[in-house]
Amino acid sequence: MPLALLALAIGAFGIGTTEFVIMGLLPEVAGDFQVSIPTAGFLVTGYALGVVLGAPLLTLLGTRITRKRMLMLLMGLFIVGNVVSALAPVFGVMLAGRVIASFAHGAFFGIGSVVAADLVVPQKKAGAIAMMFTGLTVANVVGVPLGTFIGQTAGWRTTFLVVAALGVMGLLGVAKLVPDQPRAESVRIRHELAAFRNVQVLLAMAMTVLGFGGVFAAITYITPMMTEVAGYSASSVTWLLVLFGLGMVGGNLIGGRFADRHLMPMLYVSLGALAVVLGLFTVTAHNKAAAAATIVLIGALGFATVPPLQKRVLDQAAGAPTLASAVNTGAFNLGNALSAWLGGLVIAAGLGYTAPNWVGAVLAASALVLAVFSSLLERRGTGKDRIVAGSSLEPVTMAVARH
């Protein structure tokens, strides 16, 4: 794998850390600004919405410059956002810093996926995408726990300054290692938007929303589920999330490896198994050991879908993949927000802390149905093309035979 992928992975590590570390620092941030925990939760919601909105906006703006230069600008934006968060005098400025940083998220992963795929031969594209996303998964194993520890001991502002330093490392890595390929003259905004007329692109994005939404339906409420149902102490939740992160790392690498060979079968297996495991989590959540093992499986199966789904979008939007790839990255965050809302509804309805697992199972199963439908639709189209091709050659064959 080219060294340029290391630079992309470093940037992904920083982005993943800043996205999730705030969840472990909400009490400190809320106490410093003298706001409630629910109010501080807007730092999570605001970031997610910023990813969804920023991904297409900044990607479209970036069509007029080279991808390398756009990646550098995005890392610069990421650095500024985290510095603003670290130095924020009031809560509103902190929220603005989070939104600024989030704008870099979707576009970086979208453009980075295209760059990563272009760095390798066609048979290794999904593996290259997975290598970049490894930075995001490792952030959940190393960056988030370490950032939480730093924030709880040296202050949450120090955490965001450290994350900004990671952004500097990513910026320098992109500047030094990513090749400066010229911008394709044929790339125009209308070409990028044309990809969304392809039903296969839209189906892949819907699979992203539902499939990864299934994961976060359970993980969003992991703390009350593990403390109130499984019987873990509150301090143990950090290590349970590390297990989840380890599962994400393994699933991401496995998904990238097999997606290059059997993309749709990989989606069938991962989404189907994810739906089953999420359904079983309503039972295994009552036992400490079984719950811990299930959390690893959810992380692995959930992130095993990421490289194939990202590659599916790139393949189906081959003529103008950048915007579609970025929007698909935003679709992950849309799935997170949707599943967290649905999970909250079933808990508020009095169905218990394990009820979101059923929500996740239904979402993952729905994504599997879409995957099967997408494949059948594609085969039907291919079959029609073959019939048309055969029909057009038949008169020529007959004419040759007569002569």
Image: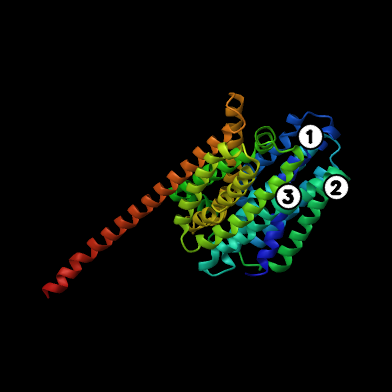
Q: Nearer the viewer, mark 3 or mark 1?
A: 3
Question: What is the crowding at mark 3: few (fewer than 14 residues within 10 Å), some, or many (at least 20)?
Answer: many
> Which one is earlier in the sequence, the residue at label 1 or at label 2?
1
The one of 183 and 342 positioned closer to us in this rendering: 342
The residue labelled by disc 1 is: 92
**What residue is shown with label 3?**
17
Residue shown at 54% from the left, 39% from the top = 360
Residue 343 in view (yes/no): yes
Task: Name which quarter of the figure residue 225 lies in.
Answer: top right
Foreground: 262 or 82? 262
Judge by depth and name the residue closer to the eye, 351 or 123. Answer: 351
- In this rendering, position of residue 323 left or right of residue 379: right
Q: Quadrant of the N terminus?
A: bottom right
Residue 187 picture location, percent across and down: 55, 58
Q: Secondary structure at mark 2?
A: helix
| Image-based side of 176 in relation to 150, left or right | left
Q: Residue at x 60, y 54 (%)?
A: 110
Amino acid under disc 3: Thr
Circle 3: element type: helix
Q: From the image, which quarter does the C terminus lie in? A: bottom left
Residue 353 location (% of width, % of height):
62, 31
Residue at screen point 76% across, 55% down:
167
Residue 317 image offset from top left, x and y in percent: 49, 55
Q: Is residue 211 left or right of residue 50?
A: left
Provide the residue designation for mark 2: 158
**Mark 2 residue crowding within 10 angstroms, few (<14) / some (14–19) / many (20+):** some
Task: Please name which of the two marks, 1 or 2, marks the residue nearer to the observer.
Answer: 2
